[in-house]
Amino acid sequence: MHRRFTLAAFSAAVLLAFIGSTRAQAPNPPAPPVNIEQPASTEAPVSTTDPDAASESPAITIPVRKAERMVTQPASSKKPASKSDGNSKNNAPSVRKSNSKTDTSTARKTSGTRASAPVHSSTPVIEEPGAGVAPSGAPAIEAPAKEPESPPVSEPIVALPEPVAAPAPPAELIVAAAVSEPPTPPVHAEIPAPKAEAAPKPAPAPAPDPVGYPPGLNAGTAIDLQWPIPADLPSVNPEGKGKVTSDEVIANLAHSKIAINLAWTLITGFLVMIMQAGFALVETGLTRAKNAAHVMSVSFLIYPLGMLGFWFCGFALMFGGYWNGPVAIGWQSPLGQGLQMLNQELTVTIFGKTMGLIGMKGFCLGSSVFDSAIFALFLFQGVFMVAASNIPPGALAERWNFKNFVTYGLWMGTFCYPIYGNWVWGGGWLAQLGFNFGLGHGHVDFAGSSVVHMTGGVAALVGAWLIGPRLGKYSPTGKPRPIPGHNVTYVILGTFILAFGWFGFNPGSTLAGADLHISVVAVNTMLASAAGAIATMLVFYWRVGTPDPTMVCNGMLAGLVAITAPCAFVNSIAAVLIGAAAGVLVVFAVLFIEGELKIDDPAGAISVHGVCGTFGALCVGLFANGSYGAGWGGVHTLVKDGVVQTIINDGAPVTLTKFTDLLAAGWVDQGVTGLFGPLFGGAYWDGKQLMADLIGVLVNIVFVGLFSFVWFKFSNRIFPLRSSRNDELDGLDIPELGVEAYPDYELNDRSSPPV
């Protein structure tokens, strides 16, 4: 009887399991799974062995297949029953959650037959009473007590009916059936959704930065140091780098230095260009009203005429071999390495010494010199050439034939100024006097007392001598007569413009805004101009009793011209002395040239630029104190304990080693030093520097003087040098230009002496 009952119960259980499996395999609408992560555990097979019937019935082990889909259990208002006791045989079925979402261990089957369709690993497992303790780490959760005959539709639980009025079964039977979702939509338990990652805060909108301080856009960040910009930025190139490398930092620092120097050179060049307006006003104001349009036009047109000549040929002759000139040890071009393309110089060898004559590269600024550094140098030197070319028009004013002037403008910018400029600034033979013959640092002219002002002054001297004085300038006895200018206001305004432009003329000659010595150069320039004006005023008070404002203006210009060459090499005391001396010198030069040489110079250009330019060039060899210009011209003069050593930069390794060793031993590399250098703070005196500067001055007088004489004689055969007598008497505005400067005014020529 007992054996038959056991068999009947087992058959009923198998039947019910088969029915549940059939229902689980029926198609249902898909529902999104809800993942419930549980701690990992390994579920062991559960045995149905009853200790009391061990001898009569074999143990049945029903492995459970790993769940692949999750069946959710609806929420219930009933309180859960107590936890199942392994020793109790009559407890209600308990629900146990699998603790492993990666459980790939033993799957349970009923007598080797699949119990249900695959379910998710988090599917509740239904155990029969007496199933034993839940696997390690998997807490058993008891389901609410329900009537076995009417389970909820949404809770597909298979329960084995207990026999009525029958003895307890010989063994505990565990049927684990994974049931799929019912046909009706399940009611999912509320499971908190995973927290979404916080969205990154949007970058703040860029705001204008008027001051350039952090954190402003213009304060500078690592982005500004990307090299090249912006190819390697991750925002542009995902494969690029996000950090600035040391090479990029070095490249940016070098680029910034060159950019500062190049911008400085261009801006100061613009200031020098504005000086041409000053020349025009001074020269026009010092002449008569009937020639005002003519004088102003000459000062204006010298700019385009000279610039085209300088572009065509002059720049190449002057700077074509710039890179080959003598330089200091370790020198690098402040405008960039592009200047090394100016490397062709026509040279001659005398006494075994190679000396440069003219440059041979850069004609018409062709493609071989199409370089930003070279173009910056061209602009700066081009406006210097125009300044030199604008000096003779003041000396030849009121009688110079306009057509002859046009040929002069082309000649000056093409040949005369560039050739002498090459010898001093282009690495030519005057710059090599120290390198080749031991004469100081060679002929040194920082900003142009000789190259610019002497060149223009000597050409003016020759031209004014050849063209002759204005009609009525000298009496029959040879005594000069005054011919006042028509507008003192023009003269004073033009002088202010020139003085302002000189702050580009002298400090700009460093070609380096990063050269902090520019402040010394600017202050020396300002002091010399002030001293020149005051000195001239005092001389006129002494000689005449009243200050002539036009001569005071020339006194200021004289101080500026004289300080142009030594402005970087002297201290402020020497600058004041140089300016004052020039202010006195210009007065006596005007009187001597006009009274003794009988050369008519309406604007005093010969005295201001020629005489004071000569004085300024010699001041380098007189007052330089060694504070600036170490290695100038390839000559290094080192001093220690009163002992002087000279090292010539020939580029030999032994020379470089010796120079480095001397510096390490405490020797001091001195700059350009003159004869009276120790009186102004110099460590020693150098008379050879004065000799080199004297040679440069004499060469200028001879070369420019002879070349100008030849040119004026030659051009006079093409176009007459002087205007006709009648045109000069009537004024040159209408005869040569066809316009008057003051058509609304009836001009009364009260200043012209009788002819």
Image: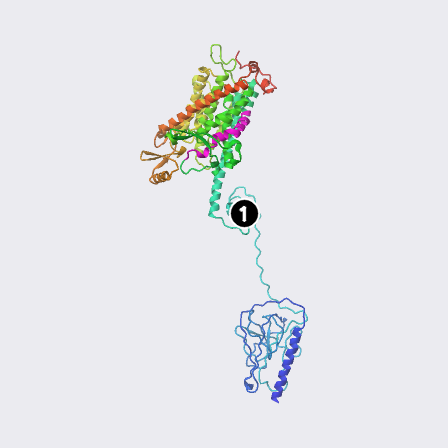
Residue 147 in sight from this viewpoint: no
The residue positioned farthest toward the bottom in the image shown:
1
Any magenta on residue 321? Answer: yes
Instruction: Give the color scheme: rainbow, by chain, secondary structure or one colour.
Output: rainbow
Q: Position of residue 153 (x, y in %)?
A: 67, 74
Quadrant housing residue 617: top left
- Identify the image quadrant of residue 190: bottom right
Q: Residue at 54% across / 47% down in the picture?
A: 231
Q: Position of residue 31 (x, y in %)?
A: 65, 67
Majority secondary structure of magenta residues: helix
Q: Quadrant of the N terminus?
A: bottom right
Give left or right: position of 734 versus 576.
Answer: right
Q: Give the vertical position of 593 relative to 205 (above or below).
A: above
Left or right: 741 as drawn, with respect to 649: right
Q: Which residue is mark 1?
A: 231
Q: Is residue 400 above or below residue 273?
A: above
Q: Of residues 22 and 73, which is closer to you in this image?
A: 22
Question: 419 and 265: which one is in front?
Answer: 419
**Is residue 256 a member of the stretch shown in magenta?**
no
Farthest top residue in view: 476
Magenta-highlighted residues: 301-327
Work out whether 23 lies above or below 599: below
Residue 731 x %, y %: 57, 16
Which secondary structure, mark 1?
Answer: loop
